[in-house]
Image: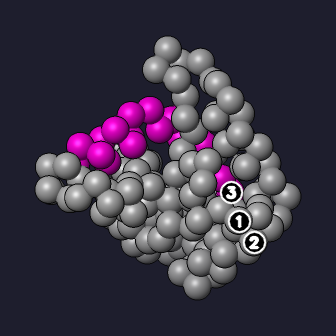
Amino acid sequence: MAFFAVLPRGQRLIGIDAGTKTLGLALSDVNRGIASPLETIKKVKFKEDAARLFDLCAEHGVGGLVLGLPINLDGNEGPRAQSTRALARNLNNLSALPILLWDERLTTAEAERMLIAADQTRKRRAEVIDKLAATIILQNVLDRMRGT
């Protein structure tokens, strides 16, 4: 995959679960083996949201972004996928960081199940669901990179 080939060694990845109101973020370790929840950005305006994202990229030595692409269960792309593709284009206009669009089908449902199993309250689930979904997306990519 071209994305993997252009990633600089020793730099982390940020995974992004882009919702309508938030950007859930996850961060890999420098060896790109483990994804951990990082932050949830409450969307304000694109330039402000992007500035926060790129500040985090600089702070953590990030060499690439993994953006969850919400493909429908039937494999078609709806309005949310189109919005995500537009987000990727807009981010590419501001930064040279490579971006991988990754099929995120059912990751939010998986995150919800994990939080329910951990007996988290509805309020707590709402606070962390996006960054947990981003963590699942990023971990899936890291696992693919290692061939597992």
Q: Is residue 106 magenta?
A: yes
Q: Around disc 3, counting alpha carbons within 10 Å, would you say few (fewer than 14), some (14 to 19), or many (20 or more)?
A: some
**Residue that mark 2 sits on:** 48
The percent coordinates of residue 119 (x first, y second) are: 14, 56
Query: Is residue 67 among what the camera can see?
Result: no
Q: How is the image coloured?
A: one colour
Whether residue 57 sits left or right of residue 38 in the image: it is: right
Q: Is residue 134 visible?
A: yes
Q: Is residue 63 left or right of residue 132?
A: right
Q: Residue 45, percent across and down? A: 76, 64
Q: Which mark is residue 98?
A: 3
The disc label shown at residue 52, or none: none
Q: Amino acid at mark 3?
A: Pro
Element marked by disc 1: loop
The residue identified by callout 1 is 44
Q: Is residue 1 above or below residue 3?
A: above
Instruction: Answer above or below: position of 112 versus 103.
Output: below
- In magenta, the rendered stretch is 98-114
Between the C-alphas of marks 2 and 3, the distance is 20 Å
Q: Quadrant of the image for the C terminus? A: top left
Residue 144 percent across, percent down from the top left: 40, 44
Amino acid of disc 1: Val
Residue in the picture at 50% in, 59% down: 24
Sequence-first tag of 2 and 3 = 2
